[in-house]
Amino acid sequence: MPGQLNLQFPSPDKLRVVVAGSWLLADSLPSLDDFALQLQSRSDIQKISFDGSAVTQWDSGLLTFLARVYQLASDQKISIDPAGLPDGARRMMKLATAVPPKENTGKHKKHRPLLERIGEKSLSMWRAAPEMLHFLGEVTLSFGRLFRGTAQFRRSDLMLFIEDVGAHALPIVSLISFLVGLIVAYMGAVQLAQFGAQIYIANLVSLGMTREMGALMTGIIIAGRTGAAFAAQLGTMQVNEEIDAFRTLGFNPIDFLVLPRILALILMMPLLVMYAGIVGITAGMFVAVTVFDISTFEYYQQTVRSMQWTHIWVGVIKGTVYGMLIGFAGCLRGMQCGRSAQAVGEATTSAVVTGILFIIIAASLLTILFQELGI
Amino acid sequence: MEATAVLHNTDPDAHITVQDLTMAYGDFIIQRNLDFTVQRGDIFIIMGGSGCGKSTLLRHLIGLKAPASGRVLFEGISYWESSPVEQQRIKRGFGMSFQSGALWSSLTLAENVALPLGEYTDLAPADIAEVVSLKLSLVGLAGFEGFYPSEISGGMQKRAALARAIALDPAILFFDEPSAGLDPISSRRLDDLILELRDSLGTTIVVVTHELASIFTIANNAVFLDAETRTMIASGDPKTLRDASPDLRVREFLNRGKT
């Protein structure tokens, strides 16, 4: 028999709740609305008692029902006599009501107005600035110690990071720069072919890849690949208290963890950028030779003629700056990470976003700077 | 001259002195008016219910978190008023066993123990390897030198972390919940090890725990933090506190709720 609910009024100020049958969560249980209505309409009720003698089986289904009855009763200051409940249910209800719910926990904040939230967000962003500057200062000091030879870190760590940042990134850097070179060559060639000037594909590709695209694309790949990895590694170490362990043993975590990571990026980014340039130019040559009937030799000649050392330097300098920024963003977010799995995810996301943001800002500033300097 | 007198505490046996310490995260005060002294060679317990700030107090003692106000003195020298060089010197005398072990996950057990040795001693690599093996065998992990932390069980990780903490023969050894996640026998073994370290090397030991069996086995001094009043409500030998503390909450805690 499914759960049944009956209300009886032995006297005007008493309500007896008769529950019968099977009260299981999985069954469809009687609604409490009728009960709540009765309770509201009869303000003279002083006491609620129960009769649970006909209950055949029960689980949390009965208990949640009782919890609501208790709640409604206490709202209207009605006393409850649990004597008629099944024995186990009575004891469970006693347990559930033993500790009053904690109030003012600050967890149920009211919905706040939009302006207030915008204001709070802006203030917290403003407060994040000194934190970033503080980290920048610490990293700068750490590099100072590196040049004086007093920085504590394991040389083998640096080698591992160099391998990971450099050698392991080659496949993806190859693929992306080949495709970018292909796109630049194709887009340019379609326009140039209108004037019969296909040979200038070589100029376009070599200049574009070495000066801008090589560094930019490599930067974005490395931000997604290495910046995220750094943030996740440091964040997990933060969660495991590994960074605290460094601090208590008197190791400077910046020297030990951040310095080799940023250093590996600074050392590897120029090489990756040059490599990306070569791959991009090769892709351009592939397009020119196969689609636009330029001979390999002609393309090579034109490339050599158009190339200048300054283009290469500009690309390499940009790449190095991007590498520094990616490492800084990744390590900053990792070190700021909170102590939960959720926080590691946020740190990783934030590292990539911050890294790419830094790259785009730096790219614009450097382009303007080199333009002004006439380089 | 009051301030100087406070800075240079004259009691020669006082190893750690906490004076009027207030701990806070921003505006939120966790504990205030903490005053206690840990004598040299004490096994000192920081106890209290969950969430009362035991681990936070430990973070203040090991120099990871600056107090909102008050002082922490080591052998009479105020840690937070010292120069970074002096702080570094004081920290060299600490060993810390973290709640989760906090072994460096990219290093093997041997490398974990060897790292502080390599950094702070002039030992040759071969000698370091010997010290490492000795420390690992002290915690019952002989032969596990080449394992990474992720390859061993949680209890073994905690013991390996202890081996790292005692690598440099610290003057003060801190434990955060040492027996959490250990079976009763390992837990008992750890207690014996703690007692042995104090008796043989004279190490001062500070332990955050609420494991009563362990408290009564090892402790000779303690402080009791209360979450409601946000301050310490008792200090002294836990056995005495259990039987004769004037405070009902302390007696209840130490008798598992029965008084």
Image (tube, coloured by chain):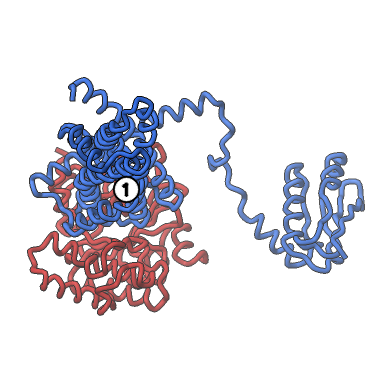
Chain colours: A blue, B red
Please report the residue visible at 68 percent of the width from the left and 59 percent of the height from the top.
A94
Q: Is residue A189 left or right of residue A12?
A: left
Q: Is residue B135 something one can see in this rendering?
A: yes
* Type of amino acid at the residue the image marks with label 1: Val
Q: Relative to the observer, which residue lies in front, A135 or B251?
A: A135
Is residue B192 shown left or right of residue A190? left
Q: Residue at x 92, y 53 (%)?
A: A10
Tell me the residue at 28%/74% (across/down). Answer: B193
Residue A140 in percent (x, y) is at 18, 39
- Residue at label 1? A173
Vertical relation: A137 (above or below) B54: above
Identify which residue, A38 or B202, lies in the foreground: A38
Helix, strand or loop at disc 1?
Answer: helix
Residue found at x 87% / y 39%:
A41
Chain letter of mark 1 equals A
Lateral position of residue A209 relative to residue B240, left or right = left
The N terminus of chain B is located in which quarter?
top left
Q: Position of residue B127 (x, y in %)?
A: 11, 72
Residue A214: percent from left, percent from top: 28, 39
Residue A228: image x %, image y %? 36, 48
